[in-house]
Image (cartoon, grey):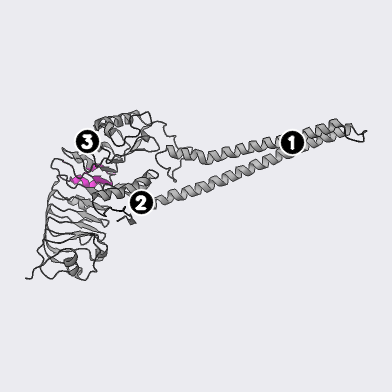
Amino acid sequence: MKIDGVEYKFKHGVKGNGDTNRRFVGYIAQQVESIVPQAVQLIDGILHVDYESLIPYLSESIKQNFKDLNNLQSKTDQIHRVVDMLYAEFIKKEQKKRNNSRNTTSGYAHISRFDMIHDNRSRKNTLRWVVGLSIAALFIVSTAIGFFFVVPYFQKSNSDAPNNPESPQNSPSTPTPPSQPLPIERAALEEFYNATHGAKWIPQEGWMTRQSICQWQGIKCNQNKRVKSIVLGQVNLNGTIPESIGNLEDLTNLFLSYNTLYGTIPLSISKLKNLEYFSFENNALNGSVPSELFSLSNLVGINLGENNFDPWQIPATISKLTKLRSFTADSSNLVGTIPQELANLPNLVTVNLKDNHLHGTLPAFVSQKLDDLSISSNRISGPLLVNSLKSLQSLHVSGNEFSGEFTFPYDNIDSITALMIADNQFTSISTDLFNASVPVLFYCSAANNNFTCPIPDWMRENCEAECVSR
């Protein structure tokens, strides 16, 4: 399986499809997230690794280590010079003392026993000085090594994310981050723990202890010790999400998927202006979906799929989410039509609205980044408008009422991985697809349509497509 151009190998006995394996692939990225969370994004319920974003951190780490080694070598050389200077000065003084002693006994033909003893003692003292200075030098070098290597290690271990190599953290003008998180944030997390039966979570490391909340399981903080990420997927959350979640003003990621949460989505989440991604997929949430959520202009990903909401519609205010890349709301009791405001968003990559009650026609999506469109099992009719989507790789439109000619971006047919168009009312297939090379498809179904012959051989052989002569 490939995600964003990176191939992931499944373990022995694990088939390469299904929601379980989508999560399995996401777990791979969790290891990267624990070290460099900035290089991992949550998109459509899956953790994705942006490997290019790792390059600055690796490059900066190498440069910093090289700089530290050079600084250490410079300090070592300086210590050597000081020791040599002290030793030379000491020898000079001892030599002067011996000369003065000999001058006072110039009438004797031989050096007295006292002079011999004094000379031996001087040599021993010299040796002691050299040994003492060497030990001192070794201590200084050890301290330097500890400063350059041990201290940064513990700083990294106690931090929640690597420092941005481009941020001026050593600048005198940079304010010192607070040493402790805000009490209001600790109170919000404690209320969340109690409201979701935290004693039954699996696991629950750190929660409700005296540890900093930044060290609690699933919690990440920014450099100001403010909660920026909550990732508690599939940990047996059972209960409601309290309104106090809105007190986490710096929150950017809220991932609570694959639990048994119920109740309504707190309206206070709409106050989180920094929020970039939230996912409540596969819970038992009910009530209405607050339309105010679709006014958070920094959102990159939304996942409301597989919940028990009251009938709701995609609001026109979604037009404000120009950064949105992923919108998932499958099996969430969506009604009405797919608004043109959604189709006009320029950065969409994934749209999943399958298994709902949508009707009307499909608007023309404008994003040239769109690679996954899933709208199966609705009541959408009219023509299928996807011919301009040059990046499309996965198309799921089965179980609708599409009619007319089936078309698909001809230039992209070689990269399609899923083509699910069964159970519609298509009557013909675009002539461009007759000359296309046979795509390598993981999923393909074109059965139960009204195709008139001829149809491409590859669709007949690989997608169960049938036609009748008229």
Residue 191 on image: x %, y %? 27, 29
Residue visible at 74% across and 40% down? 88
Alpha carbons under labels 2 and 1: distance apart: 62 Å
Amino acid carrying label 1: it is Thr
Query: For this rendering, which residue is in front, 27 or 176?
Result: 27
Q: Main secondary structure of the magenta part?
A: loop
Q: Residues within 10 Å of mark 2 (few under 14, many from 20)?
A: some
Residue beneath disc 3: 267
In the rendered image, the vertical position of residue 387 relative to residue 352, given as above or below: below
Q: Residues within 10 Å of mark 1 (few under 14, many from 20)?
A: some
Q: Choose the circle earlier in sequence order: 1 or 3.
A: 1
Residue beneath disc 1: 126
Q: Residue 325 lies in magenta, yes or no?
A: no
Secondary structure, mark 2, is loop
Examine the image and state in which quarter residue 135 appears. Answer: top right
Residue 410 on image: x %, y %? 23, 66
Amino acid carrying label 2: it is Asp
Residue beneath disc 2: 50
Residue 376 on image: x %, y %? 16, 53
Q: Choose the circle earlier in sequence order: 2 or 3.
A: 2
Q: Choose the circle earlier in sequence order: 2 or 1.
A: 2
Residue 163 on image: x %, y %? 43, 42
